[in-house]
Image (tube, helix red, strand yellow):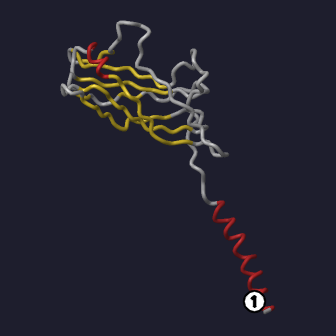
Amino acid sequence: MAEMKIYTKISLILLIPLFAGLTGCIKEVQYPLEPQIEFNRFATIQDITKKDSVGFITVSYTDGDGDIGLFDYDSVEPYKYNFYLKMLQYVDNQLIEVKPVDDSVTFNARIPILTPAGRNKNIKGNITMTLALYFARQMLESDTIAFEIYIKDRALNESNVLQTPMFIIKK
């Protein structure tokens, strides 16, 4: 019986440092403090007339301090929007910005708070935004569109600007 207690103590003495050493080798992923985005996908839903009515654009993101997202009370510049989107259309062999007639209308959007709980604030995920193509298609001269997108975190760090591939929509 005494031998069993000695073996148990020796095992614990050997296993605890081994376990501590192994967990110390696991490195936390560290992303830059500025958000980074990559295009993921674009999809549409058609209305009953077979025209593209709603679009969904998905981007992947990373952020080193997890401060992506706006609180409900963030409602004036520079915190009015944090997902910036320009719709582009292909006209005369070039992409030009689609500008709504009314300057108060925008394709920009708000990302809600994504900050994780806990010590490690590194975040990674996907953001999908919904676009009212039924409204936008009235402003289009072309059926070929693309998007230019960037995001800002609460520290006002801007991500990279990405331009999506071109898409043909049914208008």
20 lies left or right of 122:
right
Q: Quadrant of residue 122?
A: top right
Q: Nearer the viewer, residue 55 or 141?
A: 55
Q: Position of residue 152 (x, y in %)?
A: 53, 26
Residue that extends furthest to the right in the rendered view of this protein: 2
* Tag 1: amino acid: Met
Q: Secondary structure at mark 1?
A: helix
Please state, as top left, top right, bottom left or bottom right, where the N terminus lies in the image. bottom right
Dot 1, how many residues are within 10 Å of its Cα: few (below 14), some (14-19), or many (20+)? few
Residue that extends furthest to the top in the rendered view of this protein: 102
Q: Position of residue 68 (x, y in %)?
A: 56, 32
Residue that extends furthest to the front in the rendered view of this protein: 48
Please state, as top left, top right, bottom left or bottom right, where the C terminus lies in the image. top left
Looking at the rendered structure, the number of numbered marks drawn on it comes to 1
Q: Residue at x 61, y 27 (%)?
A: 155
Q: Quadrant of residue 58?
A: top left
Q: Nearer the viewer, residue 1 or 72?
A: 72
149 lies left or right of 70:
left
Q: Residue at x 34, y 37 (%)?
A: 41
Q: Residue at x 19, y 28 (%)?
A: 50
Q: Nearer the viewer, residue 48 or 7?
A: 48
Q: Quadrant of residue 16?
A: bottom right
Q: Looking at the image, is 119 positioned above or below residue 89?
A: below
Q: Position of residue 99 (x, y in %)?
A: 35, 11
Q: Position of residue 20 (x, y in %)?
A: 69, 65
Q: Residue at x 30, y 25 (%)?
A: 146
What residue does disc 1 label? 4
